[in-house]
Image (tube, grey):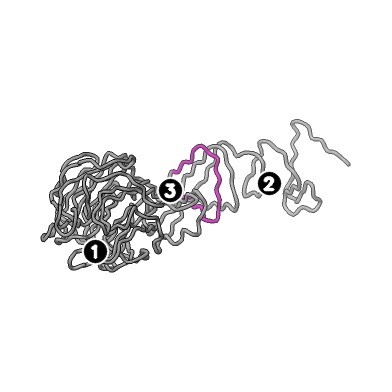
Amino acid sequence: MAKIRIGFGTELNIGSELSGIGTDNPTNTKQVLGNIHASNAKAVGVSTLTTYQGFLDKEARFGKSVIDINSQAGTLGEIVIDGEVTVSSGSTLCSGVDELTLTDSFSLPTGNTDSRIHCQTAGSMRFNEDLGTLEFYTGDEWRTVNSFKDTGNRGRGFAFAGYQVPVAYSTIRFVEIATQGNAQYFGDLSATTRMGAAFGNTTRGIHGCLYPSNIANIDYITIASEGNAIDWGADRTASAQQMASLASSTRGIFAGGASSNVIDYIEISTTGNATDFGDISNTRRNIGGFASPTRGVISAGGEFGVAHFKSTDFITIASKGNATDAGDLIGNLSGVRTCSNHTRGIFMGGYSPAGSIDDISFMTTASLGNAVDFGNLTAIRREGSCVSNQTRAVYIGGNQSWPNTGFTNVIQFITIATGGDATDFGDDLLSASQIGGGCSDSHGGLGGF
């Protein structure tokens, strides 16, 4: 076989005719079949490399153009994107860089809540058009990107309206949960009422139900300010009182109540109609609810003059569907008041067929199961109001037995992370029971969607 050796300083110039290396029938002007080993090689124009081993230069720049990555592209060094780059959902871009700099814009995939099922890779991010939030997949569930962090040193808690025979109130009161002291006047609901329910997020507090008319009315307040509540402009899907309530950062849930097993929800940042969510396991009233960032738990309760239950239900707040058994309370109870931080849900007071109780118990929301003894209130209590931040649970008012025994304005609290009995916090403005629920801007459901 002949060999042609070209020495140092010699120039080999191949013209525009077809020429091939490794082939005697080239189809391109310059065609090489086989391996090329080169240093300082430069490809000018559009090139196709079937296999490439090595590294890109220390910097790769992508201008304002469409980049079609059919499989994977690997780079080391710094990537600078000067324009708008769209990565389609069918592409995988793998980057081993220390820094990714965007100087214009970068768009994540978008879609509604139902379209989540098409993206189930841990670490995936998207914009949820229904919730108006960024969210990511943990490998087990979708979570929102949380800009809220409660260190336990902030937060207002609210008690709405209430009742002392024969007077119902419209008064909204608040406490600063991180401190101790008496409740303060905030404003009034749109009407006098009792036996409603409330929830909130970092900006709004929501109250539902006007009793005794059982109108499915919804009012809201702006937590950072003071003043009267404003009508929501839409109502629940069901008319009921003594219902459960709970919330995440974006959704508020009402569940059950007199003659109802309906669960419905609203988007707290809007003022739109409530939407059907599903059903609790049975029709019951005088129930409560609390939340972690993903789960909601609905306490036991009873049917008027008939039965008390001990079983609790849970739901996944971001989805819809019927409630599922969560575990049992320490007894058959109604009138239990509930609140939570991110990890624990607290059950306080209530009454059984034998009478009112002073028990406090808790449930770990991530694992669920039966309630565990925590301690005791300062006295037997039922139908007060419960609010919380990440550190404290506060119980407001209540009475000792129905219809008119032992109404109190005492406020008491516990430290959620520890066990033990409640301690005096201060006094409410009213001596009342059947308070229309409690809410705060720092409870256990915040950070969820």
Q: Quadrant of the C terminus?
A: bottom left
Q: Which residue is mark 1?
A: 241
124 to 320, vertically: above or below = above
Single out the residue that lies furthest toward the top. 8
Q: Which residue is mark 3?
A: 105
Label 2 to label 3, Cα distance in Å?
32 Å
Q: Number of numbered discs present?
A: 3
Label 1 to label 2, Cα distance in Å?
70 Å
Residue 198 placement (x, y as % from top left): 25, 56
Query: Which mark's residue is nearer the viewer, 3 or 1?
Result: 1
Q: Is residue 414 left or right of residue 44?
A: left
Label 3 to label 1, Cα distance in Å?
49 Å
Query: Which mark's residue is nearer the viewer, 1 or 2?
Result: 1
Question: Mark 2 touching mark 3, by CB under 8 A?
Answer: no
Q: Amino acid at mark 1?
A: Gln
Q: Nearer the viewer, residue 10 or 244?
A: 244
Q: Earlier in the sequence, mark 1 or mark 2?
A: 2
Q: Quadrant of the N terminus?
A: top right
Name the residue at 23% across, 58% down.
207
Q: Is residue 30 left or right of residue 335?
A: right
Q: Which residue is mark 2?
A: 51
Residue 364 placement (x, y as % from top left): 39, 48
Q: Which disc number belongs to residue 151?
A: none
Single out the residue that lies furthest toward the front. 354
Q: Amino acid at mark 2?
A: Thr
Q: Quadrant of residue 422?
A: top left
Element type at mark 3: strand
